[in-house]
Amino acid sequence: MIVVMNPGAKEKEIKKITDKLKEMGYGVHLSTGENRTVIGVIGQRREEAAQAMEAMPEVEQVVFITRPFKLAGREFHPEDTVIKIGKVTIGGPKLTIMAGPCAIENEEQLMQAAEAIKAGGAEVLRAGAFKPRTSPYAFQGLEKEGLEFLKDVRSKTGLLIVTEVMDQFTVQEVAECADIIQVGARNMQNYYLLRELGKIRKPVLLKRGLSATIEEWLMAAEYILSGGNFEVILCERGIRTFEPYTRNTLDLSAIPLVKQLSHLPIIVDPSHGTGLSGLVPAMSRAALAAGADGLLIEVHPNPQEALSDGPQSLTPGQFQSLINELKGVALSVGKLI
Amino acid sequence: MIVVMNPGAKEKEIKKITDKLKEMGYGVHLSTGENRTVIGVIGQRREEAAQAMEAMPEVEQVVFITRPFKLAGREFHPEDTVIKIGKVTIGGPKLTIMAGPCAIENEEQLMQAAEAIKAGGAEVLRAGAFKPRTSPYAFQGLEKEGLEFLKDVRSKTGLLIVTEVMDQFTVQEVAECADIIQVGARNMQNYYLLRELGKIRKPVLLKRGLSATIEEWLMAAEYILSGGNFEVILCERGIRTFEPYTRNTLDLSAIPLVKQLSHLPIIVDPSHGTGLSGLVPAMSRAALAAGADGLLIEVHPNPQEALSDGPQSLTPGQFQSLINELKGVALSVGKLI
Amino acid sequence: MIVVMNPGAKEKEIKKITDKLKEMGYGVHLSTGENRTVIGVIGQRREEAAQAMEAMPEVEQVVFITRPFKLAGREFHPEDTVIKIGKVTIGGPKLTIMAGPCAIENEEQLMQAAEAIKAGGAEVLRAGAFKPRTSPYAFQGLEKEGLEFLKDVRSKTGLLIVTEVMDQFTVQEVAECADIIQVGARNMQNYYLLRELGKIRKPVLLKRGLSATIEEWLMAAEYILSGGNFEVILCERGIRTFEPYTRNTLDLSAIPLVKQLSHLPIIVDPSHGTGLSGLVPAMSRAALAAGADGLLIEVHPNPQEALSDGPQSLTPGQFQSLINELKGVALSVGKLI
Amino acid sequence: MIVVMNPGAKEKEIKKITDKLKEMGYGVHLSTGENRTVIGVIGQRREEAAQAMEAMPEVEQVVFITRPFKLAGREFHPEDTVIKIGKVTIGGPKLTIMAGPCAIENEEQLMQAAEAIKAGGAEVLRAGAFKPRTSPYAFQGLEKEGLEFLKDVRSKTGLLIVTEVMDQFTVQEVAECADIIQVGARNMQNYYLLRELGKIRKPVLLKRGLSATIEEWLMAAEYILSGGNFEVILCERGIRTFEPYTRNTLDLSAIPLVKQLSHLPIIVDPSHGTGLSGLVPAMSRAALAAGADGLLIEVHPNPQEALSDGPQSLTPGQFQSLINELKGVALSVGKLI
């Protein structure tokens, strides 16, 4: 941490600040430039200390020089995290394809989707029982009934299940029927939920918030890791920008950046990331070429009848073609599907 | 709702779409232009119907022509909502000042803050027992102990209390010690929480999400209103933009816009909105001049010792000066403090 | 400037960097923390030096601790700049109202607008002869013919004129018929134009770019100031965000922030800032309450016939009412209209 | 165009609007729903007409149903535009690699860069003689001297040249030494420059503005096309968002979207798009996988000595490795390098 004093700060003022820092347990190192005195602060990064310094009238600004994430960061954990669930791995040379409908609508639709994505080559079925919706008048998901359908499909198809949990009190229930628990973009900073997920021993798929910086996203992962659950999969799903043609702006530069900063696997959701099924194939290819560890793709047996997100869903036929197309891209970056 | 057909759509394709719309219970009205056929769809707005249409390959786009909020909208509720709590009103000619520390740190700090803001002219004490924090290593609030302190301060000072609730399961508990229940920016789209708040009969202060459009914000209010709780206070607290000098960009144009679109009262939080105590006085004046029904201001007995958000907190002295300064601005727009 | 070495940097690597810095003419100051070595760099801020450092593989990041603007900054010029043009002042206790149509459409429309805004209390007429338009098929302004009309209106009404210049080669011509030369948002970083404006001795109204940070905006002013023209008026006109209900998001926090960072006057354009005439009164009041030195308001004798920006233009009657309303707000912050 | 009347509009008001539209030469088509009357407007899209309608107090909103770009759009020009310059094609199955330093610093640096990128497999040398810089104190380019160096390098190496033009008066001069003329992001809406480029017969590389929507970008291309120059190459180079870790957010979804909307070729600049040389390889691969027609990559013989943008420049060795890596990605999407 660096504390920058106001221009022309007097010795007495500098002493006040350095005394305060020492009182907080920090070492200090003065550096006096032409217009500013800068204090190098030695010791653990603490938000409280930084804010206290910023609130001092003698201080112009406080600059952090280390990243706030420790467990999620690559600095003290250089090797990649590879998550294993049965025969499926996430984060290694084999890419993971997760696919399925946005919402579970009924047993038949779910089974059709499951069979279609399995035939297409996916190993993980995604389908939501709890659906956060902007409008209170829109379909909100089948909730617990949907979880029952998921259990059934899992046992019949052998597919792994990823499904969203929306609050800390449902974590156990969702964990019983899911192999990977999804935290939605709106819940990325629901800290009680994150802490509860830190207590279980199941992989968590953590979607990036609509306007979350990469730092905030890794800090959300840090909540889960610091609780003792080390299996976090990051999922880029588009950020909010001024561009109106797409639902969100898919930030693929997050992939190599996360790979630099963190050891956690990262997958991409091109369906929510663009909102337009016509853009999903190109963005799926791009995501894999950028180094993503997998994809999360919306597939619906009949997008025109979907109760949510039809415009961004692929048909089973489109999904199958896409997977075939992706094999070459995967190979070109040394990966397998 | 307007359905725009692809350019050059054939009669058979148009018929397919109009048949589908009629099957959904809608009336249709064809309008054929030079390059496009446009279908005016008559009937209730429904997300599902719009998405189904957008998923049809024959359709270019779907355009809504009505706003999605009904209960929150002014169209069917032209008069302003004025909320009364004891002698305090929110939404009428008398402005409401809410002030206090970001977090409750201990009993003494809370009481000092309460006395300071009361002396300064505030009628509502804000202070957080549950604190959502970006870092798992930062101070997370006193939680239930904090609620106890709030009860005590309320009975001793006669101030009303506004405090944040973070999940649907704590609503009853918070409601017991708060006069107004705050939903934080990160929870604006926590729909289970919103639904629970629809069931109680206490005013809710609904902060705008960091990247929420005004439409999404009013739809979040709609969740609460549609549950039967009609006392929602909107709170603009800054949105996320590219500008790095301020913590957020306070969107004051939301005030006159919300006043046009909705009957609900709206207040402004210039402390989170800017993140810098030096900007709070100017933005408080501006908010009132723009027509806000009140302010939510961070005041801490000693910002340099605050466990959170010190840099944006006013001292009791600064708060007192600000209130004096605001009286003239209020008068100039026909309001009182 | 602070150079942060990679974690675990070796002595040899640190020496390489400090040698390089010394070779560039800088003093250095080492500060060794738990995980990082930080080099305090003493000497003039230079972009080239910072970029060279960032390109070194041994360096993690470079952090600036001083602001890049010198002449525009308040640090070495603490007193406010007040610009005088005849009897009009910009930046002092008397607020400056500039008003008029977006585009000059014909002589009659311009004269009607001029008389209306003069009657309403404005001292400066704004009207564009050169119009940057998103579509090549839209009205592009009367260009030189428009400048002639401006000269005529100036001599007949005694109003000062502010009008936009679009390239460096037209500066002299525009300067002959304008009292204040406007740089539009799209040209804020047209550096050849800025340099040419540094050579003349007329006030420049510098609009903030659609996605310009406050730092970039002040650096654009720095271009003009560094050429020797010290009369720059900043104009906040809204920034681009994700919010679709307004054309732009008016960033009023820029007012107190610019007042802290710079000595230059700042005015606000609520018409472009919102795009909706219905929001202009509230945002005009808010701008003055926040400390703006004046306003730039679109007024058209007949907005429904305007060739551009009708939806955001006030009628003469609405303008007159607004000015009356603003007098009280101005007084409440110790200013006059 | 659709004109939506205010809720509850009376017959007389509707007649006023339809009369006005007919007077403007439009056909009209009424559609009366439950709460709104909607007028389908038949005829050419015109901004002026839409704005006049929006300025009418009886009108709630105006909605466009066609895209504003005609010449740039694919609707009336379904086949891809392929640009040929000597043996180089842009837009066909062979990808185009453009590379070189941000700025020309001296003859030797330019020649070294040219040789390096030629050896690496690039066919087009990019290097700037005119450099737009945020700070007036930073290196601004060699200007005309730089153009001379480019001519020399072109004749010696046989490489094609792409270089930036900054105003309409230099177009001829730049055209003499460049094979492709670049319009920088800051000049994307410099309409005088665009119009001048419409008059010449050389390909133009049009960079997307920092906060330009895809529609605005295609409208900027429309300016050039409508002047008679049909050879426009679009270049995605990142947009401005809230994310601070990257210089810009590279919007790769623009690639498939532009391919749907327009027939023009599109290339990607991952160097400016990320600002970090470490992210350039991944984003180059992703751009090609998404369907880009080429890349524009910063390469500097010695990034640590670069006068601008060193941190985002590749070394010749890194560039060579990248091109090798890209060959497989290109093949996987049916293209060649």
Image (spheres, coloured by chain):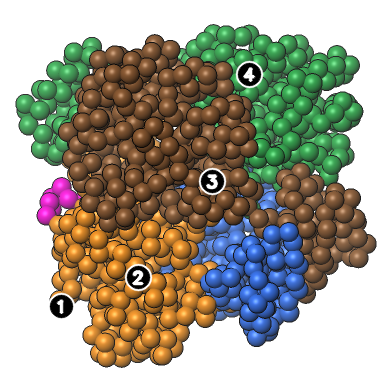
Chain colours: A orange, B blue, C green, D brown
Q: Residue at x 54, y 42 (%)?
A: D217
- Mark linked to residue A321: 2
**Eye-nearest disc, 4 or 3:** 3
* Cα–Cα span, label 2 and label 4: 59 Å
Q: Amino acid at mark 1?
A: Gly
Q: Position of residue B169 (x, y in %)?
A: 42, 76
Q: Are discs 1 and 4 located on one and the same chain?
A: no
Residue where numbered disc 1 is placed: A86
Residue where numbered disc 3 is placed: D213
**Eye-nearest disc, 2 or 4:** 2
- Mark linked to residue C204: 4
Seen from the viewer's position, the closer of residues D54 and A312 is A312
Q: Amino acid at mark 3?
A: Thr
Output the chain of dot 3: D
Asked if residue D53 is positioned above or below residue B35 in the image, the reply reads above
Badges 2 and 4: C-beta atoms under 8 Å apart? no
Seen from the viewer's position, the closer of residues D307 and A337 is A337
* Cα–Cα span, label 3 and label 1: 45 Å
**Eye-nearest disc, 2 or 1:** 2
Q: Is residue A71 magenta?
A: yes
- SS label for mark 1: loop
Q: Position of residue B215 (x, y in %)?
A: 60, 61
Magenta stretch bounds: A69-79
Q: Amino acid at mark 2?
A: Ser
User: Is residue B229 shown left or right of residue D161?
Assistant: right
